[in-house]
Image (cartoon, rainbow, N blue to C red):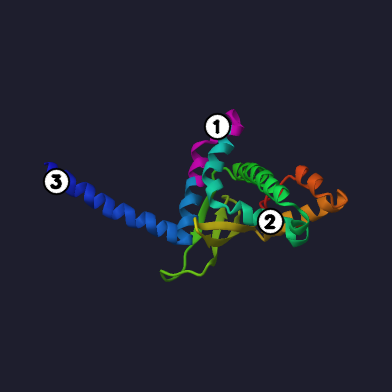
Amino acid sequence: MLHAHKNYFLFFFLIIIPLSIKSEEDPFIFIDTNAQKMADVLIKNVELFEEDRTLYEDKIKEIFEPMIDFRRVAFSVMGKKYYLMATKDQRDEFVLIFKDSLLDNYASTLAKWGDSTITTVFPDEYQSDFEKNVEVRQILDTGTSKYPISYKLRKNKDGWKIVNIIINGLNLGLTMRNQFQALATSSNEDIETTIKNWNSDFGDAGIS
């Protein structure tokens, strides 16, 4: 009996480990797996949305946070001009402020999607090798309308990370960069003031 259990567990790990490695290496599986986790949170925690909005959004953040290359995205939002104007400490400060702000905004946006379904568009043929930059497309189905979502991913030492998202034609990275520039202009290009007043804002993210 013990021998049988050993064989069972060996079989289990032989199946699970390759799937885990494949998920880390394949950007489509990476996005799809996490998207379904978020969809599961949205569906199973409907009552929690009304009872404890913060806890509800924290469940989404727990999944979404490891998926983003916050440093790269934050510096892209600053743009070359303001990135060069900022000190190292100011850049690091903005990454932290930007991270908290983006997670709050995106979690709040996802919460509004309710029991929507998300479908990943996989390539027609299996790919074993990918370029350093990849685009993964999804379809968000709210039950009444369907919206395209495009994730721009880049591979770094930690694996695949999201560097931009386009939802229903709305480029979130570009939108936030324009907002940063407008805020910097209204702050007389005072970088410290601009950073402290920053708040990621992309409204309903293109979903009406």
Q: Residues within 10 Å of mark 1 (few under 14, many from 20)?
A: some
Q: Please provide percent x and percent y for residue 131.
A: 51, 70
Along the viewing direction, whichever of 146 and 2 lies nearer the viewer: 2
Please give left or right for residue 85 compared with residue 113 in the image.
right
Q: Is residue 43 magenta?
A: yes
Looking at the image, tell me whether mark 3 or mark 2 is earlier in sequence order.
3
Q: Which residues are magenta?
A: 38-54
Q: Please provide percent x and percent y for residue 90.
A: 73, 48
Q: Looking at numbered disc 2 in the image, what kind of residue is underneath it?
A: Phe
Identify which residue is drawn at 82% across, 50% down.
183
Q: CA distance from mark 1 to mark 3?
A: 43 Å
Q: Which mark is in front, 2 or 1? A: 2
Q: Which residue is mark 2?
A: 75
Q: Looking at numbered disc 3 in the image, what kind of residue is underneath it?
A: Ala
- Which label belongs to residue 4? 3
Q: Looking at numbered disc 1 in the image, what kind of residue is underneath it?
A: Leu
Q: Residues within 10 Å of mark 2 (few under 14, many from 20)?
A: some
Looking at the image, tell me whether mark 1 or mark 3 is earlier in sequence order.
3
Quarter of the figure with residue 3: top left
Give the position of the N terminus as an image quadrant.
Answer: top left
Identify which residue is drawn at 38% across, 54% down.
20
Q: Which residue is mark 1?
A: 48
**As drawn, which residue projects farthest toward the top?**
51
Identify which residue is drawn at 65% across, 55% down.
73
Q: Please provide percent x and percent y for residue 126.
A: 41, 69
47 in relation to 34, above or below: above
